[in-house]
């Protein structure tokens, strides 16, 4: 049924009249939390999945990354869906697709099919989350103030990354990895029950037809990202450039990228317009996202290698760190909200604080690497890393919204997602994996009497040390940016091309 565009106070006209107004927005927040807990193959149970399905660890990681990439791709289409379908249809469809993907994933070990299921589950995970959150945005942030909205949103979105891993670990430990899929299926059925009983079809405008949507562009960009993720996820397995499959993958990636960009430049309504790449400060923003993902990748490689390969801790022992990370994320998001709305300070100062938190994790872990490390000593560095990551993720998204107009903002989210959702994490995982193998071999060949475990321990410490040096250099650059003479000099510095012309004229 159609209705007028809601004006004035916050209202949720899609509810049935008998639902109390006080709990209406909270129900949608609860459904958003349930959507964010969903997936297809859950990395928190990766070791159990590899043991029962015959899939390699790299296969399970790639399936998980397909889900992450799928989450990134619907951004340019979200409002088109919202203007075409009712809230009820969108929520029911998203929940049904996610439940179906989780069910099918239980009964197949065919890798390509699992990758497609994971991608679809991620795609509709974002569709469902967006539909829930977009209806309570004015309740969360009156006046659509994004400096309030994004910190509150990322308490849910980033927080559920930690929460999903913790829930998957607990469910797998006490039951099996399949039970996590059944749990998500149950949550999706609960969402469908809520939507069926509490809401009604409602439109605030006439449905807009799904025309001028670049479906092929979405597929091509998805293939580009997945091919890049595949290269770095399987690089160590295929021995990088020594493997024929890896070299073929490189060629396919560049061919797909060439076709994708060429097509986007010559059609009327591309999935991502080329104009979206031309904003002045977009490149520095992407560089900051790369640094954030790089600093956040060390726990997934170095810390996990330390706790499992050297200390031999079980998954349930380290699973408590996911809850610590969840607390740190909430603190970081609320601190960003306080910094921007109450203190009204600069972005660079906030990014410096976030960088200090993330580098503090690297420095503390460098000194903590030892065979006598206990779990409690990891609480503080994990908390600081989560705080820093939340500060960067939230503040950079707010800055992106200020940088781009609405026409390109959701395309900008996808562009940033191309950097942060999968490729950089898999890249750094591959780099650290290769570096670990190189350092272990080098330490064993030095003839100083190290056994394999000791060589692994020394290699972890060496890689943490290298990360510390680069991270400290990055923070020093941010700190120097606050020094007025340095900042003014840097802003007035001429290009090398102009300096060369002036030098030639002086010589003449």
Image: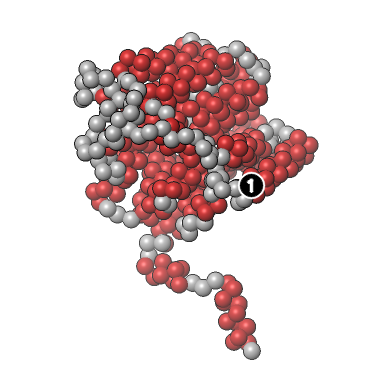
- Residue 101 appears at what percent x and percent y? 54, 19
In this image, 154 relative to 62: left or right? left
394 left or right of 71 in image: left
**Who's the residue at 39% across and 40% down the image?**
390
Q: Position of residue 408 (x, y in %)?
A: 46, 48
Foreground residue among 190 and 487: 190
Q: How many circles with numbers are drawn on the protein?
A: 1
Q: Is residue 455 visible?
A: no
Mark 1 nearby-residue class (10 Å; few <14, some 14–19, many ≥20): some
Q: Is residue 292 above or below residue 176?
A: below
Residue 323: x and y in percent read 39, 27
Question: Which residue does the numbered mark 1 point to in the structure image?
Answer: 263
Q: Residue at x 32, y 20 (%)?
A: 199
In which quadrant will I find the N terminus?
A: top left
Report the residue at 41% width, 32% height from top.
Answer: 207
Say above or below: 385 vs 351.
above
Q: Residue furthest bottom?
A: 508
**Residue 500 visible in the displayed image:** yes
Spot occupied by residue 124 in the image (x, y as percentages of width and height): 48, 27
Question: Quick check: 71 left or right of 108?
Answer: left
Q: Nearer the viewer, residue 470 or 100?
A: 100
The image quadrant of residue 246 is: top right
| Extreme residue in the top direction | 175
Residue drawn at the location 29% of the way across and 49% of the way down: 340
Nearer the observer, 60 or 118: 118
Quarter of the image with the C terminus is bottom right
């Amino acid at each position: 049924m159609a209705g007028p565009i809601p004006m004035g106070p916050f209202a949720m006209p899609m509810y049935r009249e008998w639902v109390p107004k006080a709990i209406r927005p909270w129900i949608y927040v609860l459904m958003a939390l349930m959507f964010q807990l969903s997936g297809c193959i859950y990395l928190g149970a990766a070791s159990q999945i590899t043991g029962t399905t015959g899939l390699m660890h790299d296969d399970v990681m790639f399936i998980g990354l397909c889900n992450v990439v799928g989450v990134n791709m619907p951004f340019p289409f979200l409002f088109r869906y919202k203007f075409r379908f009712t809230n009820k249809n969108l929520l029911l469809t998203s929940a049904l697709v996610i439940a179906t993907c989780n069910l099918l994933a239980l009964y197949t070990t065919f890798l390509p099919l699992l990758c497609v299921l994971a991608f679809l589950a991620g795609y509709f995970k974002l569709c469902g989350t967006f539909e829930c959150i977009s209806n309570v945005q004015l309740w969360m942030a009156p006046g659509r103030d994004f400096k309030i909205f994004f910190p509150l949103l990322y308490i849910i979105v980033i927080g559920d990354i930690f929460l999903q891993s913790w829930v998957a670990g607990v469910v797998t430990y006490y039951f099996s990895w399949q039970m996590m899929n059944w749990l998500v299926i149950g949550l999706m059925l609960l969402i469908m029950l809520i939507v069926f009983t509490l809401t009604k079809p409602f439109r605030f405008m006439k449905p807009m037809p799904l025309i001028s949507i670049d479906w092929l562009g979405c597929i091509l960009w998805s293939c580009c990202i997945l091919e890049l993720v595949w290269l770095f996820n399987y690089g160590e397995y295929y021995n990088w450039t020594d493997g024929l499959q890896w070299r073929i993958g490189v060629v396919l990636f560049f061919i797909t990228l060439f076709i994708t960009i060429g097509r986007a430049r010559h059609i009327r309504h591309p999935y991502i317009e080329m104009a979206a790449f031309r904003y002045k400060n977009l490149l520095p923003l992407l560089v900051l996202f790369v640094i954030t993902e790089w600093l956040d990748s060390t726990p997934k490689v170095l810390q996990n290698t330390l706790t499992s390969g050297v200390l031999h801790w079980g998954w349930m022992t380290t699973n408590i760190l996911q809850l610590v990370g969840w607390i740190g994320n909430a603190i970081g998001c609320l601190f960003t909200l306080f910094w921007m709305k109450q203190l009204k300070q600069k972005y660079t100062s906030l990014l410096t604080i976030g960088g200090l938190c993330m580098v503090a994790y690297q420095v503390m872990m460098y000194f903590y690497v030892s065979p006598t490390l206990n779990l409690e000593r990891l609480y503080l560095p994990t908390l600081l890393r989560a705080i820093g990551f939340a500060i960067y993720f939230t503040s950079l998204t707010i800055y992106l919204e200020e940088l781009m107009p609405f026409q390109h903002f959701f395309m900008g989210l996808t562009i940033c997602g191309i950097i942060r959702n999968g490729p950089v994490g898999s890249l750094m995982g591959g780099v650290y994996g290769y570096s670990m193998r190189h350092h272990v071999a080098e330490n064993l060949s030095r003839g100083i009497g190290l056994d394999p475990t000791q060589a692994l321990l020394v290699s972890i410490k060496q890689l943490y040390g290298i990360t510390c040096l680069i991270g400290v250099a990055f923070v020093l650059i941010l700190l120097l940016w606050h020094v007025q003479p340095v900042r003014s000099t840097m802003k007035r510095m001429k290009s090398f091309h102009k300096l060369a012309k002036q030098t030639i004229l002086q010589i003449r």
